[in-house]
Image: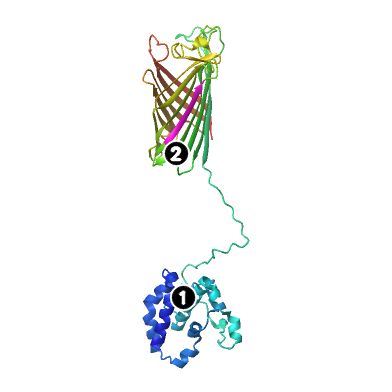
């Protein structure tokens, strides 16, 4: 008997070795084969009894689809738990192991199943089992749920594609007013002022290689001055700018990028008591296009972008009004005609350092941008920094400092080529 049982188990192990090495059935064969053999010998089971034992009989016949095996496989009590439980009788252990082997045959080689259990019973070669006498085994383990991969049924699957686009914006509208009686001891002027700002970001990032950032900002402010008798209102802040950057990530935090920036203003600016403007829409109009490297390190929520385009930045300036061309940096020796106005263009090196909006505290944000360009004959530099203080959901205060250096314009007697602007506002704001 020992020889027959050992040969039988070796054949079974060879057939299921490749598919069952990771299962508890395989582990049970390795760890408990001696125990089964010894138990079978010690219980005094004779050869005649073994021939009539239906537990072993299932292994000597052609593969049969047994209903009890399938029902146990899809019940809430897993066969693996039953096979390893020391509380079960040895025959139940043997039966559970054989059930697992038969189930493996059903799933991997269904073509080898010769008949179903009902056909086998009709031939009176297999004793009927009263399944009502088989008591279910309770398990303290979490029930194993078997969901065949190839069974979809009538279920409908909805695939939700990730949205790589991110849209955000901020707008504000601020007012200020000052009134002084004619006999105010310090003197001064009455004035009204208003400032509207809009900042919009539309960014794309596929979290792999491609990124595409777009930023639009508009600032427009008006003010009155009692000393100006010609204009009731005139602009004191006027800027419209669009900037886009397309990046392809080559290594972590480093992109090969292409950048485009367009900048101008919307309204004319008149000095006090004159009807001749010194700047206007498309006077000047600046366009800059370049290809370079964009390094984007981060430290927690603090992010910074360092963009460098060596000798690959194209700079274009256009002034729509001929009489303003020289004052706005288009010299007579390097200009060319474009429509009604004059333009200049050149190649050089560009450096842009940007700190996207960073929340220092729950109520204080900072945004900063530094830009430098040179064609090695002239240089342009500007640095903008803005602090936003959120007083509540709709009220805000901000401080903006903007410095510029441009040696292509007419030099000022007091400031030279440097220009400086500071602005403090208090008003309503809305973010989305």
Looking at the rendered image, the disc whose residue lies closer to the viewer, 2 or 1, is 2
Q: What stretch is highlighted in magenta?
A: 256-264
Q: How many labels does the image show?
A: 2
Q: In this view, does 385 lie to the left or right of 323?
A: left
Residue 76: percent from the left, percent from the top? 52, 70
First along the sequence among labels 2 and 1? 1
Q: Which residue is drawn at 42% across and 80% down?
A: 9
Disc sitting over residue 248 in the figure: 2
Residue 345 visible to the viewer: yes
Is residue 94 placed above or below 265 in the rendered structure? below
Is residue 141 placed above or below 394 in the rendered structure? below
Is residue 302 placed above or below 96 in the rendered structure? above
Residue 206: percent from the left, percent from the top? 48, 43
Q: Is residue 185 left or right of residue 64?
A: left
Looking at the figure, which quarter contains the N terminus? bottom left
Judge by depth and name the residue closer to the eye, 46 or 366. Answer: 46
Q: Main secondary structure of the magenta part?
A: strand
Counting other residues with Cα less than 10 Å from the Cα at mark 2, is it few (<14), some (14-19), or many (20 or more)? Answer: some
Give the residue at mark 1: 82
Residue 304 visible to the viewer: no
| Dots 2, 1 in contact, CB < 8 A | no
């Amino acid at each position: 008997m020992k020889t027959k049982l050992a040969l039988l188990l070796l054949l079974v192990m060879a057939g299921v070795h490749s598919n069952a090495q990771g299962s508890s059935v395989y582990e049970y064969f390795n760890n408990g084969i001696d125990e089964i053999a010894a138990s079978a010998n010690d219980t005094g089971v004779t050869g005649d009894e073994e021939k009539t034992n239906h537990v072993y009989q299932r292994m000597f016949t052609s593969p049969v689809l047994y209903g009890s095996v399938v029902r146990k496989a899809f019940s809430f009590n897993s066969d693996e738990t039953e096979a390893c439980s020391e509380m079960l009788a040895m025959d139940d252990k043997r039966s559970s192991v054989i059930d697992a082997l038969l189930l493996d045959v059903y799933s991997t080689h269904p073509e080898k199943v010769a008949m179903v259990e009902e056909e086998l019973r009709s031939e009176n070669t297999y004793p009927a089992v009263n399944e009502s006498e088989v008591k279910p085994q309770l398990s303290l383990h979490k029930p194993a749920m078997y969901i065949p991969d190839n069974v979809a049924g009538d279920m409908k699957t909805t695939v939700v594609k990730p949205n790589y686009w991110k849209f955000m914006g901020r707008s504000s509208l601020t007012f200020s007013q000052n009134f002084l009686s004619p006999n105010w001891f310090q003197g001064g002027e009455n004035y009204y002022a208003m400032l509207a700002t809009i900042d919009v970001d539309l960014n794309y990032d596929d979290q792999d290689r491609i990124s595409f950032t777009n930023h639009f900002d508009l600032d427009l402010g008006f003010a009155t001055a009692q000393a100006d008798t010609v204009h009731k209102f005139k602009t004191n802040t006027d800027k419209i700018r669009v900037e886009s950057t397309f990046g392809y990530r080559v290594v972590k935090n480093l992109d090969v990028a292409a950048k485009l920036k367009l900048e101008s203003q919307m309204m004319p600016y008149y000095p006090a008591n004159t009807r001749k403007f010194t700047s206007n829409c498309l006077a000047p109009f600046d366009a800059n296009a370049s290809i370079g490297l964009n390094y984007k390190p981060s430290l927690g929520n603090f992010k910074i972008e360092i963009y460098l385009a060596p000798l690959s930045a194209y700079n274009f300036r256009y002034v729509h009004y001929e009489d303003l061309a020289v004052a706005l940096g288009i010299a007579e020796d390097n200009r060319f005609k474009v429509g009604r106005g004059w333009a200049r263009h050149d190649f050089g090196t560009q450096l842009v350092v940007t700190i996207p909006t960073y929340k220092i505290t729950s109520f204080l944000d900072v945004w900063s941008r530094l830009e430098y360009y040179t064609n090695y004959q002239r240089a342009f530099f500007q640095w903008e920094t803005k602090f936003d203080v959120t007083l509540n959901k709709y009220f805000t205060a901000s401080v903006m400092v903007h410095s510029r250096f441009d040696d292509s314009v007419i030099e000022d007697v007091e400031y030279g080529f440097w220009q400086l602007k500071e602005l403090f506002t208090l008003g309503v704001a809305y973010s989305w």
